[in-house]
C-alpha cells in the first residue's frame, strides 16, 4: 500500500480533532501466556490504520496546532542481539517508507517519556507547537469496566497533567474505518478467496464419522497453503445439534451420518478479514427436511443481499431478515405468531467487516457506499438437531450492493454436485 494512503488517513483524522490536541496510539504487545511463552501478536487495528506498520511496541504521536500537523513515531531500537534472537528489527528508514512519517521524526521507544514531557507537554522552548489542551486516546473496552490499555500506559501522564482533557479517538476512527477504499476492498476480496479455497477443501474431504477438528484441519491447511496468514477469528465447525449453539468452538465431536455441518470461518489477507458461513450435509445429500429449512435460510440470505443499498439502517436490515424468517417459519408450521421467531433465530443478520471481523462503525447512521458488511441469516431447531447459517460478505455500492463472496457455492444442487465429484 502506498504510504500516501496513511498520510491521508492521519490528515482526515486530524481535521476532525480539536485544535491544540494530540493523539497517542500504541501498537501494543502480545499478552504473556506461560513461562517464556507469549500469545501470537496481533497489531492494534487503529494503529495499523493510521501508520501501515505491523510491529509490536511502537507508538505514534500526532499533534495539531493552528491547523499544522506534527507527527512522531517511536520504534524499538535494532541491536545485534535483537536481530539474532528475535528477528530483524525495523529501521527508521523502513518505518518512514511505510508510514510516510519523516525519518527525522522517528525516535526510539525509550525516548518516548522524555520527549512527551520536554517537547509537547511541558511548555518548554523545545516545543514546536503550543501545549495541547486535548489528548485523544483509543478508549476501546473489550468488556464493561475494563480499563483501556492506553489509560494504563499513560496513567502517570494523565495524573501529572490533569489539565489535559481526554477525548475518545474511537469516535473518529470508527467512522473513518467504516468506508473502505479500493485497496481495502481488494484485500477483503483476497481474504474471501482464501475462505473459498478452505471451504472447498472441506467439502472435498468430508465423510460421515470424521471428527469436526479433522474438517477444520483441512480448512486451515488449504487456506494457509494458498497464502493466507490464517484464521480471522476462532473457527466454528459444528455438526448436528452443535450448530444450534452460535459460538460453538470446541470442534471436537464426531459427525454422524446424515448430519448437517455448519462452517463459520474467516481468513486473513494481511490484517483484513473475511467471514463466511456455509452449511452442508456430511454425506453429500440433503434430506427433504434439511432442504426445507435450508431453502428458507437461503432465500432470506438472497433477499437481504438485494435489500442492501445506501440510505437504509442496519436496524431495518435486521428487522427485514427477522420478518422473512418468521413468515417462513409460519409456513412450515413451526410458529404461530411473529414474535415466536426468537425460538429459532436469535442473532442479528449483519455486522461491519474490515480490519476486524466485527469491524468498528456507527450502527446509528444510514449505510453508504464503501461499507462492507455481512449477511448471515440462520435458523436453529435444537429438537431436530438442525442448525443452518448462510453468510456472505457484501459491499454497499452507490446503487445497491455487490456480493463479494458470490463464488462460494451455496445452492443445494451446487453443493451436492460438488461433493459427488
Image: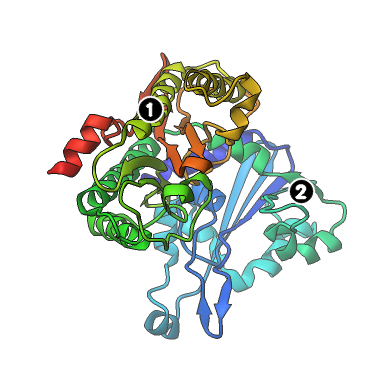
Q: Contact, CB < 8 Å: mark 2 with mark 1? A: no
The residue singled out by tag 1 in the image is 292
- SS at circle 1: helix
- The answer for how far apart the CA atoms under marks 2 and 1 are is 63 Å
Q: Is residue 104 above or below residue 181?
A: below
Residue lying at the far right of the rendered structure: 162
Q: What x and y, as percent, mark residue 51?
A: 49, 51
Measuring 44% from the left and 23% from the top, which residue is drawn there? Answer: 300
Q: Percent from the top left, x then y, of residue 366? A: 58, 20
- Locate residue 147: give its quadrant: bottom right
Mark seen at residue 132: 2
Q: Quick one: quadrant of the N terminus? A: top left
Comes first in the chain, label 2 or label 1: 2
Can you tell which mark lies on residue 20?
Answer: none
Q: Specify whether 109 is left or right of 281.
A: right
- Is 64 situated above or below 211? above
Q: Which residue is found at the position 51% from the left and 22% from the top?
A: 333
Amino acid at each position: 500500500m502506498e504510504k500516501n494512503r496513511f498520510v491521508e488517513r492521519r490528515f482526515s483524522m486530524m481535521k476532525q480533532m480539536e485544535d491544540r490536541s494530540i493523539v497517542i496510539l500504541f501498537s501494543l504487545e502480545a499478552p504473556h501466556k506461560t513461562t517464556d511463552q507469549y500469545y501470537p501478536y496481533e497489531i492494534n487495528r487503529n494503529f495499523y490504520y493510521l501508520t501501515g506498520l505491523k510491529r509490536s511496541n511502537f507508538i505514534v504521536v500526532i499533534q495539531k496546532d493552528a491547523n499544522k500537523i506534527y507527527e512522531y513515531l517511536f520504534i524499538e531500537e535494532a541491536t545485534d542481539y535483537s536481530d539474532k534472537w528475535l528477528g530483524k528489527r525495523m529501521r527508521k528508514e523502513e518505518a518512514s517508507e511505510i508510514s510516510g512519517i519523516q525519518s527525522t521524526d522517528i525516535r526510539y521507544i525509550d525516548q518516548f517519556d522524555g520527549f512527551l514531557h520536554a517537547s509537547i507537554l511541558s511548555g518548554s522552548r523545545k516545543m514546536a507547537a503550543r501545549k495541547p489542551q486535548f489528548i485523544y486516546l483509543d478508549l476501546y473496552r473489550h468488556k464493561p469496566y475494563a480499563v483501556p490499555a492506553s489509560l494504563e500506559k499513560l496513567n502517570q501522564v494523565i495524573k501529572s497533567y490533569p489539565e489535559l482533557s481526554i477525548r475518545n479517538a474511537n469516535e473518529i476512527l470508527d467512522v473513518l474505518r467504516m468506508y473502505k477504499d479500493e485497496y481495502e476492498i481488494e484485500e477483503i476480496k483476497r481474504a474471501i478467496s482464501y475462505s473459498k479455497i478452505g471451504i472447498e477443501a472441506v467439502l472435498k474431504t468430508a465423510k460421515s464419522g470424521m471428527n469436526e477438528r479433522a474438517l477444520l484441519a483441512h480448512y486451515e491447511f488449504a487456506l494457509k497453503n494458498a497464502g493466507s496468514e490464517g484464521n480471522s477469528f476462532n473457527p466454528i465447525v459444528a455438526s448436528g445439534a452443535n450448530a444450534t449453539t452460535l459460538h460453538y468452538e470446541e470442534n471436537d465431536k464426531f459427525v454422524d451420518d446424515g448430519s448437517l455441518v455448519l462452517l463459520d470461518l474467516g481468513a486473513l489477507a494481511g490484517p483484513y478479514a473475511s467471514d463466511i458461513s456455509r452449511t452442508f450435509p456430511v454425506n453429500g445429500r440433503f434430506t427433504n427436511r434439511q432442504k426445507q429449512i435450508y431453502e428458507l435460510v437461503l432465500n432470506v440470505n438472497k433477499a437481504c443481499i438485494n435489500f442492501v443499498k445506501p440510505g437504509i439502517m442496519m436496524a431495518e436490515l435486521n428487522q427485514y431478515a427477522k420478518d422473512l424468517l418468521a413468515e417462513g417459519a409460519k409456513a412450515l408450521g413451526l410458529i404461530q405468531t411473529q414474535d415466536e421467531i426468537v425460538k429459532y433465530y436469535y442473532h442479528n443478520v449483519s455486522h461491519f467487516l474490515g480490519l476486524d471481523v466485527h469491524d468498528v462503525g456507527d450502527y446509528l447512521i444510514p449505510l453508504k457506499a464503501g461499507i462492507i458488511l455481512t449477511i448471515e441469516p440462520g435458523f436453529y431447531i435444537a429438537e431436530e438437531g438442525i442448525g443452518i447459517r448462510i453468510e456472505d460478505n457484501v459491499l454497499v455500492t452507490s446503487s445497491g450492493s455487490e456480493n463479494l463472496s458470490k463464488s462460494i457455492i451455496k445452492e443445494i444442487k451446487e453443493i451436492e454436485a460438488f461433493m459427488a465429484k
